[in-house]
Amino acid sequence: MVEQNIVVNVGDIIPELKLPPVTRTTLALFAGASGDHNPIHIDIDFARKAGMPDVFAHGMLSMAWLGRLLTAWVPQSQLRTWSVRFLGITHLGDRVTCSGQVVEIFEENGERRAKLEIQTRNQEGEVKIAGEAVVCLP
Amino acid sequence: MIDKKWIGYTGPEVRFDIERGRLKFFAQAIGESNPIYLDQGAAQAAGYRDLPVPPTFLLAADLDSNELFSTLAKMGVSLGKILHGEQGYTYYQPVCAGETVTVCSRISDIYDKKGGALEFIIRDSSVTNASGELAAEFRSVIVVRN
C-alpha cells in the first residue's frame, strides 16, 4: 500500500503481481464466480467447434488480476476509473505477470491523481492486455 | 452483419443482489488473499460496511441475468464468435455485500473493420445503488469474428 507520507513520482513502477499458470480449474472456477459461462472458456468440444484449438482464459480473469495489482498498491476506494484493451488470448499454461507504471500526476476534481499504464504479459513477455488506471493519491 | 437498428437499444433494468458468499468465491477464483475481500471484520476495520465488490466484479450483474448473452443472441451473434475487446470501469460510490444494485445497459455503437470481418459492439452499463445514486459505470466492447 502507498503510505500517506510516501511520494509518488512519474516513472515509478508499482510492485508486480505474478500469477501461477492458468489451468482448466482456474477457468472453471472463474466462470462460476464471474458469471461468464461462455462455454468457449470451459468446454473443449465447444471451443473446437468454434475453430479454437482449446479453451482459453477469460479476458476478465486477467483484468481481475490487474485489479488485484492496483488494489495491492492503493486501497480500492482510491481507484477512480480504468480501462483495458484485450490484445491477445491468454492460453492454458500461461504464466501471467501484471505490472504498472505511473505516467502522469495531475489535479482533477480537487484531488491529486496519478495515471498508470498497466499491462499483463505472459512468460514470453508478450503483452496480452494493456490499459490505464487513474487513482487518487493521499 | 449486425443490424444497425440495435444501436441505442436499452435492455431492461436488472436487479442484482451482492452476496457475501459470491464475493468470497470470486476472490478465491482470482487468487485474492487480501482479507478485506474475504473477511467481513477486516472489511469493516478498513471502513467498508461489508465485503466490497472487487474492481471488475460488477460485470456479473450483466452476465448472471443473461442480459448480455441474450441480447447478443437476439442480434444474431453466436458466443463462439465473440472476443472481449475492451472493458472499463468508473466508480462513484463503493458497493458492498448486502446491497442490491440496479444495472441498465445500452448498446451505444456498432461498427465494423476490415470490410466486415470484425464487428464491434459498444455496450455502456450504469450501476445504481438502493439510494438511487449512480455507483459505477462500465463499458464493454465485444468483438465479433465473422
Image (cartoon, coloured by chain):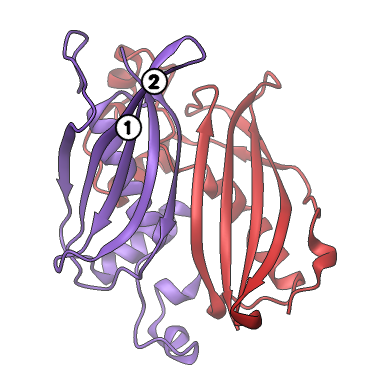
Chain colours: A purple, B red
Tell me: A51 left or right of B2: left
Q: CA distance from mark 2 to mark 1?
A: 29 Å
> Which label belongs to residue B119?
none
Quadrant including the N terminus of chain B: bottom right
Q: Residue at x 32, y 32 (%)?
A: B37
Which kind of residue does numbered mark 2 sit on? Phe
Tell me which chain the residue with mark 1 is part of: B
In the rendered image, residue B99, in percent from the top left (x then y), is placed at 56, 27
Which residue appears farthest toward the right when viewing the image? B5
**x, y percentage for residue B54?**
40, 36
Residue found at x 23% / y 38%: A101
Q: Is residue B131 above or below residue B116?
A: above
Residue at 28% across, 25% down: A74
List the residue tagged with mark 1.
B37
Residue type at the position of mark 1: Tyr
Disc 2 target residue = A106
Q: Tell me if residue B142 can be seen.
A: yes
Residue B95, percent from left and from top: 51, 27
